[in-house]
Structure formats: structure tokens, C-alpha cells
Amino acid sequence: MSLAKVIEVIAEGSTMEGAVTNAVKEASKTVHNIRSVYCENIKGIVENNKVVKFRVNAKITFVLED
């Protein structure tokens, strides 16, 4: 039987895809066996009337080791 755990992180990137990728990349430095990422609350950061960055709340699921 496998047991999974979910952590929530906030990540930033120059695109939405970049923000999601950064969430997984940074989490994988200390978390192993990542299986999925679920994003909520995508936020655009605006400066001088332009979107310059994106932030996401990402729920990262990983399987615990035996």
C-alpha cells in the first residue's frame, strides 16, 4: 500500500507555466517521489500596466517512501 502526502507552496515565474515548473523544481530539492501538482489561485503581478510575473498556489503530491 502506498501513502501519499500533499504540501502547498507558492511559486513565481515569468509565465504561468514557469511558475508551476518552478514550484515543482524547488520542491524537488527536498521532496522525493513527486507525482502531481495541482494549481489554485493564479495571480498576475502588474507593474506599469503590464503583467510582469505570475504566482501560483501549488499543491504538490508525493508518495512516501517505505
Image (tube, rainbow, N blue to C red):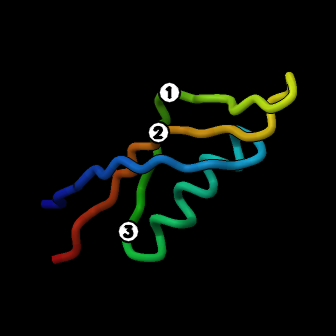
**Residue found 42% across the figure and 56% down from its top:** 35
Q: Quick one: SS at disc 1?
A: strand
The CA distance from mark 1 to mark 2 is: 6 Å
In the image, residue 21 lies at what x, y percent? 63, 54
Of pointers 1 and 2, the one earlier in the residue sequence: 1
Of pointers 1 and 3, the one earlier in the residue sequence: 3
Image quarter hosting the C terminus: bottom left
Q: Which residue is the site of mark 1?
A: 41
Give, as a three-letter code, the residue at label 3: Asn
**Residue found 48% across the figure and 47% down from its top:** 10
- Are circles 1 and 2 on residues that touch, CB within 8 Å? yes
The CA distance from mark 1 to mark 3 is: 24 Å
The CA distance from mark 3 to mark 2 is: 20 Å
Q: Which mark is residue 57?
A: 2
Q: Which residue is the site of mark 3?
A: 33
Q: Nearer the viewer, mark 3 or mark 2?
A: 2
